[in-house]
Image (cartoon, grey):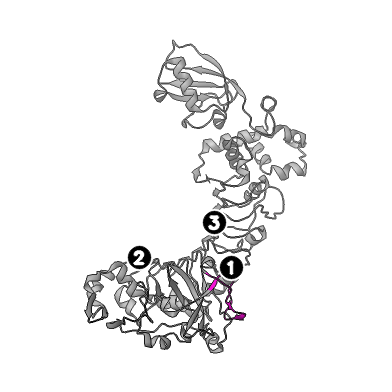
C-alpha cells in the first residue's frame, strides 16, 4: 500500500489522502492537438494529452499520488514542482521496479520525496508521464470497434486527432452483454463521467483490473458502485492509498465475494484496516506482498472461506494462529513461505483441536518443513481432508517417495487427498498396516503390549507416533512374525517369498519366486511374460493374503511397488488373462 510521502509542498501533502481526480473531458467529443514543437512531444502511448501551454495548469497538486506509466515502467508521483537550477516542472517518481530508479528522492543534498528503496526514485518531465484513461475508454479499446469511434485528420503542419464518440448508445448493444472481462494492463486510472459505466455495461460480474493505474480505493469504488452484479475483482499489481473511512465505501462492494490483491505491497495490518469495505468477502488472494506478520481479525473477514498468502515471508507458526479462529475458513494456501513447524495445544494425546475448525484444505508446498512432528500436528485438525506439501525437506527424508506418502497417510486419519492425488481406501489400509508394522519394535520397547491391560506407553513414543494406539485398536497389535520379518524404522527393500498361480489354467503349475517388495507391478508383469509367454498388457493380477482368506485384492496400478499393496511373505499372486 502507498502512503503520502514527505514533500516541500504542505498543500500537496494535505491532499494526498483524498481522492485524486484526473482532469475530466467530455464524454462526447474532445480535440487533442499535438503541436509540431520540440518543447512538447507526448509519448505515442500517452492518452492523457493537452496543449503544451496548458501543461502547468493540468499538473497541479492534484497529480501528487497518481499512478503513471513511462516507457513500460509503473510508478507513483511523489513530488510535483521545480528542481533548481533547472527550469520548468518535474515529477518525482517512486518506481515499482527499483532498478528503474536512480536515487532515494534526493538531489544535490536536498530531499524532495522519500523512497522505500535507496535507488527506487527518479525525476521525469511531465510530458513523459502517461496518467491513464477512464474505465469506459479502456473497455471500448478492448472490446469495442475502434473504426466506429476513431477518426483522424491532418490540417496543415498540425496533426489533429479527433477522439471519442457522439453517443455511447452505438456501443451499448455490445458492451451491455459483457459479464466476465479483463482490462489487465489497459492503463485504467478512473471511472470517467458519472454513471457512464452503469449505463454502458451494467452486467459485469467478473472484472480483472490488474496492472493498471488505479491509485486509490475511492477510484475503485467509483467503478464498483456502478457494477451492481460485481462479485469477483482482481486488483493485483496496483498500488493504493489507504482509504480514510473504509466503511463508507462498503456499499460499492456489497456483493463482492472474491478479491485478488497479489503484488500490491499491502500488509496484513492494512488488509484488516480495509476489510470493512468487503462485508461478504469469501475468497482473498494476497500472494507476493512481503507479508511477514499477522494478527487476529476482529469483527472482520468472518465470511472468509479461502485465504491465499503464498509467496510471502511468514516464518513463525504463531502468525498462523491469527487465522485459527476464522469460523468459515475452509482453504488456506501458504505455499512458498518459510514455515517449518506448527503446534496445536490439546488436553491429551490423540485429541483434536478447536482451532481451524472448518479447515478442509491446506497447502504448504515450498516451505521449510523437515520434521514429522509437523505432520503429527495436522492430525489434530478435525476437518482436514486435503494436504499439499511438496518441495519441503521432509519429502526427501526417505529414499523412496512412496514411503513418505504412506507415512503421511498413516499419520493423518481423515486425509482424502495428498498432493492432489486421491487416497483410495486400499491405499489407506496398506499405509496404516505398514506403519503399524514399521514401528512395532519401537512400540514394544516403549511399553506396548498385546494385552491392552499391560499397555504403558512412554510419553516420547506417544509424541512421535500419536496415531499408533488408534491403529492398534483398528487392526490389532502387530504379531511376533510381522515384527521379526521387518527391519525397523524404515521400509527398506526386502525379498518376499510369493507363490504365483494361474487359477483359470489348472494345467499351469504354481511357481515360487523371491521378489523384492520394491518391484513395481509393471516389472512383475514383465517377469510373468517371460515365465508364461503372455503379453503384460493382457494380464490381470490380484493377490490373496493368508490373513484374509477368500478375498482377492487387485494390483490395478502398474506403477506402484508390491509394498504399496502390503503384500507379505507367503502371499499368493493370482494371474489371469
**Span highlighted in magenta in the image:** 101-121
Q: Are marks 3 and 1 in contact (CB under 8 Å)?
A: no
- Give neighbour class at mark 1: few <14, some 14-19, many 20+ (Cα, 10 Å): many
Q: Measured from the top left, where is residue 317 in percent x and y?
A: 66, 57
For marks 2 and 3, the one nearer the N-term is 2
Disc 3 target residue: 333
Residue at (66, 54) in percent of width and height: 342
Labels 2, 3: front one: 2
- Give neighbour class at mark 2: few <14, some 14-19, many 20+ (Cα, 10 Å): some
Q: Measured from the top left, where is residue 539 in percent x and y?
A: 42, 23
Q: Measured from the top left, where is residue 523 in percent x and y?
A: 49, 25
- Mark 1 → mark 2, Cα distance in angstroms: 28 Å
- Give neighbour class at mark 3: few <14, some 14-19, many 20+ (Cα, 10 Å): many
Question: Residue 519's image quarter?
Answer: top right
Residue 188 shows up from this direction: yes
Disc 1 target residue: 268
Q: Secondary structure at mark 1?
A: helix
- Mark 3 → mark 1, Cα distance in angstroms: 15 Å
For marks 3 and 1, the one nearer the N-term is 1
Disc 2 target residue: 181
Left or right side of 517 for 488: right
Comparing 411 with 225, the one in front is 225
The quadrant the C terminus occupies is top left
Residue at (36, 72) in percent of width and height: 45
Q: Measured from the top left, where is residue 169 in percent x and y?
A: 23, 77
Question: Residue 210's image quarter?
Answer: bottom left
Magenta-drawn stretch contains 62: no
Q: Secondary structure at mark 3?
A: strand
Left or right side of 430 for 237: left
Amino acid at each position: 500500500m502507498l502512503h503520502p510521502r514527505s514533500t516541500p509542498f504542505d498543500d500537496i501533502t494535505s491532499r494526498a489522502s483524498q481522492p485524486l481526480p484526473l482532469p475530466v473531458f467530455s464524454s462526447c467529443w474532445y480535440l487533442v492537438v499535438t503541436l509540431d514543437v520540440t518543447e512538447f512531444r507526448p509519448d505515442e502511448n500517452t492518452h492523457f494529452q493537452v496543449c503544451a501551454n496548458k501543461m502547468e495548469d493540468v499538473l497541479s497538486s492534484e497529480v501528487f499520488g497518481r499512478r503513471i506509466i513511462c516507457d513500460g515502467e509503473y510508478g507513483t508521483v511523489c513530488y510535483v514542482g521545480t528542481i533548481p537550477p533547472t527550469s520548468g516542472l518535474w515529477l518525482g517518481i517512486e518506481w515499482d521496479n527499483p532498478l528503474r530508479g536512480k536515487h532515494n528522492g534526493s538531489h544535490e543534498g536536498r530531499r524532495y520525496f522519500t523512497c522505500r528503496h535507496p535507488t527506487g526514485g527518479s525525476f521525469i518531465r511531465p510530458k513523459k508521464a502517461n496518467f491513464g484513461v477512464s474505465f469506459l475508454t479502456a473497455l471500448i479499446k478492448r472490446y469495442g470497434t475502434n473504426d466506429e469511434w476513431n477518426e483522424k485528420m491532418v490540417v496543415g503542419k498540425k496533426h489533429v486527432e479527433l477522439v471519442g464518440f457522439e453517443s455511447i448508445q452505438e456501443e451499448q448493444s455490445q458492451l451491455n452483454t459483457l459479464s466476465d472481462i479483463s482490462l489487465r494492463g489497459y492503463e485504467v486510472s478512473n471511472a470517467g463521467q458519472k454513471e457512464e459505466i452503469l449505463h454502458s455495461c451494467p452486467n459485469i460480474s467478473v472484472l480483472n483490473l490488474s496492472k493498471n493505474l488505479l491509485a486509490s480505493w475511492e477510484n475503485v469504488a467509483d467503478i464498483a458502485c456502478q457494477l451492481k452484479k460485481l462479485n469477483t475483482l482482481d486488483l493485483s499489481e496496483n498500488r493504493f492509498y489507504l482509504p480514510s473511512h473504509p466503511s463508507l465505501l462498503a456499499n460499492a462492494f456489497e456483493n463482492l465475494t472474491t478479491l485478488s490483491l497479489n503484488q500490491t505491497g499491502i500488509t496484513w495490518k492494512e488488509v484488516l484496516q480495509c476489510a470493512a469495505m468487503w462485508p461478504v468477502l469469501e475468497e482473498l488472494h494476497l500472494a507476493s506482498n512481503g507479508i511477514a506478520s499477522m494478527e487476529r481479525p476482529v469483527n472482520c473477514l468472518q465470511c472468509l472461506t479461502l485465504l491465499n498468502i503464498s509467496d510471502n515471508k511468514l516464518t513463525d507458526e504463531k502468525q498462523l494462529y491469527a487465522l485459527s479462529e476464522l469460523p468459515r475458513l475452509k482453504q488456506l494456501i501458504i505455499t512458498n513461505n518459510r514455515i517449518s513447524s506448527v503446534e496445536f495445544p490439546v488436553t491429551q494425546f490423540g485429541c483434536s483441536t478447536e482451532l481451524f475448525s472448518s479447515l478442509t484444505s491446506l497447502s504448504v508446498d515450498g516451505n521449510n518443513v523437515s520434521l514429522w512432528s509437523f505432520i503429527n500436528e495436522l492430525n489434530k485438525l478435525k476437518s482436514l481432508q486435503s494436504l499439499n506439501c511438496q518441495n519441503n525437506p521432509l519429502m526427501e527424508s526417505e529414499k523412496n517417495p512412496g514411503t513418505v506418502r504412506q507415512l503421511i497417510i498413516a499419520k493423518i486419519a481423515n486425509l482424502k487427498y495428498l498432493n492432489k492425488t486421491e487416497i483410495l481406501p486400499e491405499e489407506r489400509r496398506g499405509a496404516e498396516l505398514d506403519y503399524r508394522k514399521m514401528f512395532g519394535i519401537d512400540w514394544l520397547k516403549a511399553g506396548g503390549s498385546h494385552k491392552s491391560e499391560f499397555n504403558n506407553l512412554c510419553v516420547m513414543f506417544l509424541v512421535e507416533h500419536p496415531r499408533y494406539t488408534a491403529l492398534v485398536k483398528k487392526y490389532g497389535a502387530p504379531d511376533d512374525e510381522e515384527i521379526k520379518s521387518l527391519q525397523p524404522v524404515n521400509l527398506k527393500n526386502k525379498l518376499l517369498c510369493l507363490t504365483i498361480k494361474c487359477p483359470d489354467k489348472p494345467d499351469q503349475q504354481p511357481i515360487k519366486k523371491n521378489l523384492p517388495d520394491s518391484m513395481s507391478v509393471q516389472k512383475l508383469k514383465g517377469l510373468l511374460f517371460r515365465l508364461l509367454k503372455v503379453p503384460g498388457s493382457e494380464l490381470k493380477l490380484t493377490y490373496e493374503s493368508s490373513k484374509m482368506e477368500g478375498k482377492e485384492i487387485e494390483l490395478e496400478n502398474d506403477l506402484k511397488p508390491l509394498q504399496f499393496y502390503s503384500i507379505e511373505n507367503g502371499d499368493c499372486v493370482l494371474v489371469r488373462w
